[in-house]
Image (tube, rainbow, N blue to C red):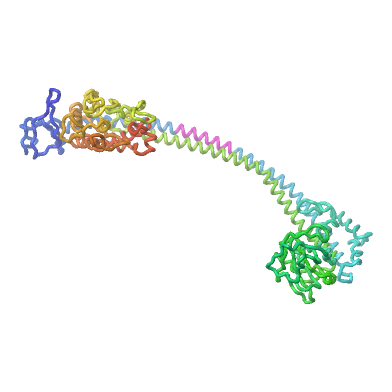
């Protein structure tokens, strides 16, 4: 029969009815097929059916409970529809007003930017048009002047060539110089210098400038500076007798008979770089084989040469033996020859120096005999080349000026674009935050509207975690209380009223040395009886203080199993027909065996064994709320001391618990 508790006989809950079992008097059984519960009038033999009124009396009818539940559900549904409609209307209005305000703000921003960009484009277009008109006029004038100058120069060249061709002889003569005094109009000057000065005066100005912006000052000076070395070679050149330092000879070349070991001999300086540019070669007459060549620079006057290059024999492919016995050095096509500024031909005997001749020739080996005409031709060609370069330089300057003028505009546009991008980014961030806020509000509203516990009252009883104690700096002595505990957050999301009976330090069993008189197995009786649900969250202090685990057979508060039996029986009596829910302990930093050899997992399993399996209560797994201090990052952010969650930890637990409770 039932047991005596506090001077009263309390019926014994025996779970689901089993026909093969026998039952004591005042035993309560449950029939799954009908949902009804029966209590025994006397001791019931095995095999006695529940329909036997001699032994059984019905104590709870499923149909009545269902009828009451249907009435409650109908009322809740009607209220839910009203609340949902009101919520949707309020949310639609808020969304509409917010979108209108943001659309107006974006439209104003885009309009201001468009106006500024339009004004900038107009300024750019106007400036480019003015600059292009001015520079086009300058280029046109320069081109006309160049065309006229080329035409006059071509006429002068043709006349000079005709006159020079009439001169008999192979080398430049005084007759040629006399002929050069006569200009294209037949005017005869006192000397060649006067003739060249007249040409200077005619071609003075832009045409006399070089590409780098400098000016030679006169045509005579130009010829003197640019082609003097060529002129000297054409006139026969000059051999010098002196000394050259040959200590840097390349020993891999055989210089036997070609280079005096002491560096004594006759030398001739040849500007092969200039000849290469003019597509000219050099002819040597009267030499014994290919000459030795030192590449490099020199300094000083006659007999004072300073070696600054590599002394070696020019490769054979850079020379060509002519039919008349001359040796031609291919300066016009040889990149090897072009790589050095000057050449020094060395070790000529006095006899060779007296007989040797060096002349400039074209690529076919024909000597350039009419030197003045050759020079003037090259001057004209060089003027044409420089004119093209100047024209390119002018166009380049136009482009540079345009780019210079556009640069601040581009900078301003880029800055405006950056500002716009920043504004758009800020708007997007604002929209994202607003969207997340709206989604969260909608989710919360829908959860409340769909809550099975909206408008109901839920009693929570537990230890310091339910109370809300925590420490922000770690340690074992919590010194603060969260403003909102997880149980209150869960009820807020469910639309339910929360009663918090949490007290720090209490256990489920009164055998704990810490606050034994405040044990949950005793304090549950002090809770308000008018509750629709009771949630018990305990067990972590039983584990922490080493309460004996006991066995499933314990029915008195002498162990953790026994305390659970006492608590569950009392809750059945105090809250008949109400929902009873157990929440197993949350994860903590240490869950290993305690001083009585039991792990936290074993205390958790005891709750399942008694509350769920013996009494049919709902049991929620505290290890699935999403927090575990075993993870260092989670501990540092949510559970600093390894046991008690901080305020944001309570937020996460409350959100998880709301979903769990709503599913019951």
- Residue 406, position as x, y percentages in the image: 66, 44
Q: Is residue 85 above or below residue 162?
A: above
In this rendering, does residue 444 appear at all? no
Q: Is residue 371 above or below residue 418?
A: below
Residue 651 lies in quadrant:
top left
Q: Is residue 546 above or below residue 332?
A: above
In this view, the residue in front, 227 or 387, is: 227
In this picture, residue 3 sits left or right of residue 91: left
For the C terminus, the quadrant is top left
In this view, the residue in front, 321 or 529, is: 321
In this picture, residue 614 sits left or right of residue 214: left
Instruction: Please say whether residue 217 is one of the residues in the magenta stretch.
Output: no
- Residue 227, position as x, y percentages in the image: 81, 60
In this picture, residue 647 sits left or right of residue 419: left
- Residue 22, position as x, y percentages in the image: 8, 36
- Residue 91, position as x, y percentages in the image: 40, 32
Residue 606 lies in quadrant:
top left
Find the residue positioned furthest to the right: 190
Is the magenta region chiefly helix, strand or loop? helix
- Residue at 88% over, 58% down: 196
For the N terminus, the quadrant is top left
- Residue at 72% over, 44% down: 130
In this view, the residue in front, 283 or 382, is: 283
Instruction: Please say whether residue 104 is one of the residues in the magenta stretch.
Output: yes
Find the residue positioned furthest to the front: 262
Residue 51 lies in quadrant:
top left
Find the residue positioned furthest to the bottom: 323
Query: Which span is picked out in magenta?
Result: 96-113
In this rendering, does residue 382 appear at all? yes
């Amino acid at each position: 029969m039932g047991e005596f508790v506090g001077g009263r006989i309390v019926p014994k809950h025996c779970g689901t009815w089993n026909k093969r079992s026998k039952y004591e008097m005042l035993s309560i059984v449950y029939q799954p097929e009908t949902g009804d519960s029966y209590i025994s009038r006397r001791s019931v033999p095995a095999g006695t059916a529940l329909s036997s009124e001699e032994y059984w009396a019905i104590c709870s009818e499923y149909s009545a409970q269902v009828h009451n539940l249907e009435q409650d559900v109908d009322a809740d549904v009607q209220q839910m529809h009203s609340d949902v409609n009101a919520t949707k209307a309020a949310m639609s209005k808020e969304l509409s007003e917010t979108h209108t305000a943001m659309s107006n703000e974006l439209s104003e921003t885009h309009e201001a930017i468009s106006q500024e960009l339009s004004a900038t484009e107009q300024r750019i277009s106007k400036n480019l048009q003015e600059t292009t008109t001015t520079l086009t006029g300058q280029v046109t004038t320069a081109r006309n002047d160049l065309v006229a100058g080329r035409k006059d120069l071509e006429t002068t060249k043709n006349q000079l060539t005709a006159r020079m061709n009439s001169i008999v002889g192979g080398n430049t003569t005084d007759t040629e110089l006399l002929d050069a005094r006569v200009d294209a109009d037949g005017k005869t000057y006192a000397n060649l210098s006067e003739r060249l000065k007249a040409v200077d005066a005619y071609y003075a100005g832009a045409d006399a400038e070089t590409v780098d912006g400098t000016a030679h000052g006169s045509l005579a000076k130009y010829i003197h500076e640019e082609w003097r070395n060529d002129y000297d070679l054409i006139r026969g050149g000059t051999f010098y007798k002196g000394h050259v330092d040959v200590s840097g000879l390349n020993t891999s070349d055989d210089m036997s008979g070609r280079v005096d070991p002491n560096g004594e001999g006759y030398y001739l300086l040849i500007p092969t770089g200039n000849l290469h540019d003019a597509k000219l070669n050099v002819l040597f007459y009267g030499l014994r084989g290919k000459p030795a060549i030192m590449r490099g620079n020199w300094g000083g006057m006659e007999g004072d040469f300073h070696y600054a290059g590599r002394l070696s024999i020019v490769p054979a492919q850079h020379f060509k033996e002519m039919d008349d016995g001359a040796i031609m050095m291919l300066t016009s096509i040889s990149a090897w020859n072009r790589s050095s500024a000057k050449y020094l031909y060395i070790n000529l005997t006095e006899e060779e120096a007296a007989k040797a001749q060096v002349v400039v020739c074209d690529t076919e080996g024909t000597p350039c005999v009419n030197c003045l005409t050759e020079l003037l031709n090259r001057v004209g060609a060089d003027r044409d080349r420089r004119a093209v370069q100047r024209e390119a330089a002018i166009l380049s300057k136009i482009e540079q000026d345009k780019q210079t003028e556009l640069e601040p505009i581009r900078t301003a546009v880029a800055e405006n674009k950056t500002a716009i991008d920043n504004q758009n980014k800020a708007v997007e961030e604002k929209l994202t935050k607003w969207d997340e806020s709206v989604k969260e509000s909608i989710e919360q509203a829908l959860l409340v509207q769909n809550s099975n516990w909206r408008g109901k009252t839920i009693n929570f009883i537990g230890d310091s975690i339910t109370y809300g104690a925590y420490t922000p700096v770690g340690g074992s002595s919590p010194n603060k209380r969260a403003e909102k505990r997880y149980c209150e957050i869960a009820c807020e999301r469910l639309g339910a009223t929360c009663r918090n009976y949490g007290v720090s330090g209490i256990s489920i069993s009164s055998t704990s040395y810490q606050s034994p008189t405040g044990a949950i197995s005793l304090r549950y009786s002090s809770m308000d009886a008018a509750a629709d649900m009771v949630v018990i969250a305990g067990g972590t202090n039983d584990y922490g203080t080493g309460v004996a685990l006991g066995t499933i057979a314990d029915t008195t508060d002498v162990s953790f199993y026994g305390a659970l039996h006492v608590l569950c029986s009392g809750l059945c009596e105090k809250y008949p027909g109400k929902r009873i829910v157990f929440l197993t302990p949350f994860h903590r930093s240490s869950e290993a065996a305690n001083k009585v050899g039991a792990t936290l997992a074993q205390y958790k399993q005891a709750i399942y064994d008694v509350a769920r399996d013996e009494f049919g209560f709902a049991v929620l797994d505290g290890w699935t709320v999403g927090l575990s201090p075993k993870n260092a990052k989670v501990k540092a952010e949510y559970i600093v001391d390894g046991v008690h969650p901080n305020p944001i930890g309570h937020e996460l637990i409350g959100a998880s618990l709301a979903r769990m409770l709503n599913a019951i």
